[in-house]
Amino acid sequence: MARDEIYRTRDVDRPAAPFEFSEAVVKVFPDMIERSVPGYRSMLDLTPLLVRRAVQPGSRIYDLGCSLGAATLAARRAVQVDDVEIIAVDRSPDMVARCREVMAADNSRVPVEVVEADLLDMAIENASVVLVYYTLQFVPIAERDALVRRIHDGLRPGGLLVLAEKLAFEPPSVQDWLDTHHHDFKRSQGYSDLEIARKRQALENVLVPETRAQHHERLRAAGFTAIVDWFQCFNFAAIAAVRGAADG
């Protein structure tokens, strides 16, 4: 696994460029996310438990913003019913190319189609599970309501959306406490203060987190009938939302 040293630089007077999923990021992405997102591996390890109960025969699983396919693989290995197809979507050509290689090297018989597309343009159809892992936070806020409604409408009754996000918190003292401990986590993973500061600068106005309450309100407005906060580690959390069995 290549080590993330993208923000290790001596050119401290030069502002960090806005973050993007470039070829350089693709090369180090597994290391970057493991060392940047506390609880990431634990959440992935628990994902198959959710997928196994929710996936329905003859349906689709979508992984929106699939990156290199870690969540896709977790879902793929959980499928125990017939005639299930997984659609993994990402708009970064470099991510898609590498994700296709990862899927080809995996020995599961569950078919996976890796699609290069903007998830805002992607149709969601006949889904029993939709995974959106650390992706909605990069979508313009004005587009988020419509995307979540489209996911709800593309799910079968009883279908599951799993949404993982970096959260914002109120009051500011709580946000400061969580930010401080998140940065301590990153230091414990070998990132320097300079790398932490430059990565934060690069993500400003690119990754825009919302509060848990804002996510819940959006999910309820879209029509989800059961909303469960099932995982949190510092300021990173995952929410499960179920489409009601009778609202189809």
Image (cartoon, rainbow, N blue to C red):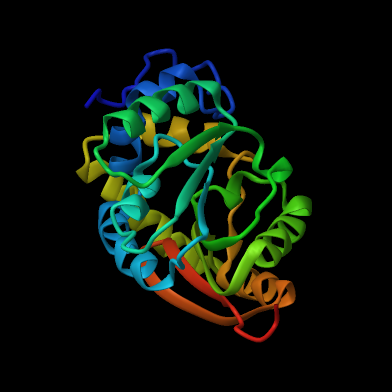
Q: Residue at x 26, y 52 (%)?
A: 41
Closest to the observer: 172 or 84?
84
Task: Mark yes or no: residue 7 visible.
Answer: no
Q: Is residue 158 left or right of residue 192?
A: right
Q: Residue at x 44, y 56 (%)?
A: 83
Residue 15 vertical position relative to residue 99 in the rendered view, above or below:
above
Residue placed farthest to the top in the image?
Answer: 11
Q: Residue at x 43, y 71 (%)?
A: 54
Q: Is residue 216 left or right of residue 134?
A: right
Instruction: Answer with the quarter of the image where residue 121 lies.
Output: top right
Question: In the rendering, at what x and y percent does residue 73 appear?
Answer: 33, 46
Question: In the rendering, at what x and y percent does residue 226 appear?
Answer: 55, 83
| Total numbered labels | 0
Closest to the observer: 148 or 181?
148
Question: In the rendering, at what x and y percent does residue 2 appear?
Answer: 25, 23
- In what quadrant of the picture does the C terminus appear? bottom right
Residue placed farthest to the bottom in the image?
Answer: 246
Residue 129 vertical position relative to residue 230 in the rendered view, above or below:
above
Q: Is residue 189 left or right of residue 55?
A: left
Q: Is residue 189 left or right of residue 96?
A: left
Closest to the observer: 183 or 151?
151
Question: In the rendering, at what x and y percent does residue 165 appear?
Answer: 50, 57
- In what quadrant of the picture does the N terminus appear? top left
Task: Mark yes or no: residue 214 visible.
Answer: yes
